[in-house]
Amino acid sequence: MRNLNLNALKMFDAAARHLNFRIAAEEMNLTQGAVAQQVRGLEADLGVMLFRRKARGLDLTEDGRRYHTEVRRALLIIKDATQKLQPNAKQVTISVTPSLASKWLVSKLPYFMETHPGIDVRTIASEEKSNFTSDGVDIAIRQGARPTGDNLYTALLSPHDFRAICSPDYAKNTGNIGKVSDFLNHLLIQDGHRLWNKLFDEAGLGLPEQMLQFNQTALAMDAAANGQGIALAPNLLLSNEIEQGRLVEIWKDDRSIEGGYYLVYPLGDAANAEARTILANWLLSECAQVMEE
């Protein structure tokens, strides 16, 4: 067997993490065809099928899953060794939920890049829990209870502060919304956190017969902006949409709810520890401004 091409291994790693050639190609700034071709060549060199091709996306075979574990570990060792040789190389990888990425972080990052041009920020939008070792993640932001674990730094970015929102046109016909039961006469939009269920349950009310369902908060917000009903969403995600006039707030949830959005990263030495700390402090500062509004 000839020596394996490092670029092919990198493309295999990207495809295995995303289970999608298109997204892997976007990450590597290549064409989808180039990534698929390199992966096919790698499979031919190995004499092993690494993926099962599906109509939408990919699945790793058992051999592919085992191989990716080792390849990923090897690539991270190479990355770490290179960073130690290049102490001025400052790249920070941040993992955030897809809704937080699209509705908040994406619009904020250009300001960070302007004030910190020497720091390269790589964003991964994922619901998966980061392990900070084999996944290459330096900082994670997650929603829910405060993360726990040995040698972890955690900080509250934003508490759970939910608002009922809809489009300006829909708001013209909502009337006065003063209590939970007032929502029963409206079209409601639910996301994967099932906030409406919890709200009605605590109020001792049954659920409406029909609600529009989405798995992500960002999609529920988009549906609300399109006039399809009323959604519940964390205040942290709403500032841009409200400023742009796509959404209006019609009710605030005043309950005291545990949890929120937490910033997490591993304690200890790292090649990019200074850059990681700068980005973490900036994120905390940006979120503090939202909470003060």
Image (tube, helix red, strand yellow):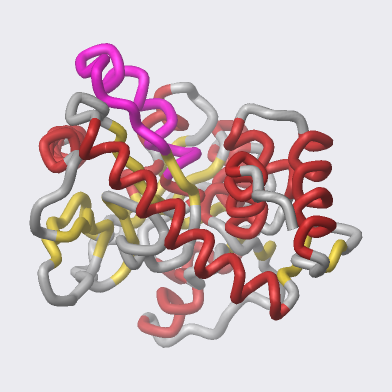
- Which residue is drawn at the image coordinates 38% and 81% (left, top)? 203
- Main SS class of the magenta portion in the image: helix
**Of 164 and 281, the residue lying toward us:** 281
* Residue 279 drawn at (x, y percent): 20, 35
Any part of residue 17 in sight: yes
Which image quadrant is residue 89 in?
top left
Q: Residue furthest right?
A: 55
* Magenta residue check for 109: yes
- Which residue is drawn at the image coordinates 87% and 63% (left, top)? 54
Q: Quadrant of the N terminus?
A: bottom right
Please state if 24 lies on the left or on the right of 147 as rendered: right
**Of 181 and 224, the residue lying toward us:** 224
Which image quadrant is residue 68 in?
bottom right
Any part of residue 51 in sight: no
Report the magenta residues as a range: 101-122
* Residue 201 drawn at (x, y percent): 43, 84
* Residue 71 drawn at (x, y percent): 53, 61
Please state if 105 lies on the left or on the right of 185 as rendered: left
* Residue 282 drawn at (x, y percent): 16, 33
Q: Quadrant of the C terminus?
A: top left
Q: Look at the picture and state if 272 lies above or below 210.
A: above
- Which residue is drawn at the image coordinates 41% and 87% (left, top)? 204
* Magenta residue check for 190: no
Which image quadrant is residue 44 in?
bottom right
